Image (tube, grey):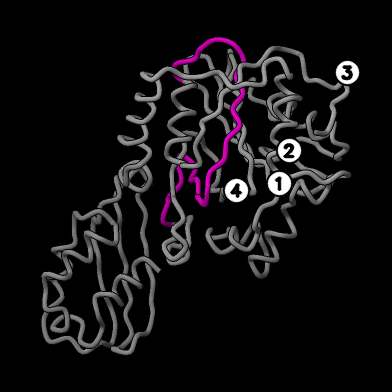
Amino acid sequence: MLPIPSHLFYNDYIMKYFETGSLDPTYNLAFEEYILRHHTEGEILMLWQNDNAIIIGLNQNTEAEINRGFVDQHHISVVRRITGGGAVYHDLGNLNYSFITDIDKAEQVVISKFAEPIVKALLSLGLDAEASGRNDILVSGRKVSGTAQRILNGRILFHGTLLFDSNADVVANALNVDADKFKGKASRSVKSRIGDIRDFLREDMTLPEFKDYIIRFLVGDSNQNAIPLSASEIAEIENLRDEKYSTWEWNYGTSPKFTYSNKRRFDGGSLEARVDVEKGGLIKDIVFYGDFLATTDMAEITNSLKGLPFRRDPIIDTLSQFRIQNYFGGITTEDIAALLFK
């Protein structure tokens, strides 16, 4: 266990420490929201991990942020959080942290202030760490943490990821990378901008050892054990998970209205789709174009899809009720699904 000199402990205030005890992103985000809403006194720290998940910002269009085919193929969970900012990929090479404390005004949200405990912990490991820009923590100029905030009833939730030993190739393939942020090939661009904390350590440690160090640095040995929640609190968290964070309506349906378009060539011909999706994730209008050999007018198909959630299963179920070759020739239902959901 790497010792921490006593003068380096971050002891400006006493933190209460909670752990979720789970790798499930739907449970972890429900846990975090519950603590924010119901534990309304004192400074709180949470450390937690999600296994194989994309966490979407509060105001983002989910379908526009993810590589749908890769996400489905690799069984990656997609969950919306209650804070703003961009989509991030979580795996077991990441350690997530949450701070909750009192705040009087939104103008007091300054990253350098709320990131200070993490920055000091990294500095104590001999790393060249700093808070930078709108929401980043850097080590030797590489981004190792992105942060986001939410203010509720005079309390602020400030949370972020700590990239300890992450898989940049998965990040590049799971997310629809913003070309303004990452130039060139995605995997190499992501690697050039972000960094893993482990690569900068003077003395190597595992992620569990790093987590233990952060706990001891921020909370101290005497308060290292997490505060337990009651059975009734756990039940409320599970209910919040089931009714909010596990639902399509929260993770996809709350996306702002958007227009989706895509074009591909299949064995049965070319097919292009343009879809207008209302806020709430429902199809307002949908049109198909292409050189496929149809024998029946398309209106019956498109009218049946209007009002449906822009989701694979309900669309496939509806299309399966039709003799699809009459409308699309040699293009199959699975081809249409591949076009709409990449």
Q: CA distance from mark 4 to mark 1?
A: 9 Å
Q: CA distance from mark 3 to mark 2?
A: 19 Å
User: What residue is rendered at 46% in x and 46% in y?
Assistant: 60
Give neighbour class at mark 3: few <14, some 14-19, many 20+ (Cα, 10 Å). Answer: few
- Is 230 above or below relative to 136? above
Question: Residue 210: which disc?
Answer: 2
Asked whether 47 falls inside the magenta stretch, the response is yes
Give the residue pinned by disc 4.
92
User: What residue is rendered at 75% in x and 31% in y?
Assistant: 213
Query: Residue 34, position in %: x, y?
Result: 44, 24
Query: Residue 288, position in %: x, y?
Result: 26, 74
Quarter of the image with the C terminus is: bottom left
User: What residue is rendered at 80% in x and 28% in y?
Assistant: 120
Badges 3 and 4: C-beta atoms under 8 Å apart? no
Q: Amino acid at mark 4?
A: Leu
- Is 124 above or below relative to 275? above
Q: CA distance from mark 1 to mark 2?
A: 9 Å
Give neighbour class at mark 1: few <14, some 14-19, many 20+ (Cα, 10 Å). Answer: many
Q: Earlier in the sequence, mark 3 or mark 1?
A: 3
Q: Toward which corner of the image does residue 242 lie, by quadrant?
A: top left
Q: CA distance from mark 3 to mark 4?
A: 31 Å
- Judged by depth in the image, the label closer to the viewer, 1 or 2, is 2
Question: Quick check: 297 left or right of 99?
Answer: left
Badges 1 and 2: C-beta atoms under 8 Å apart? yes
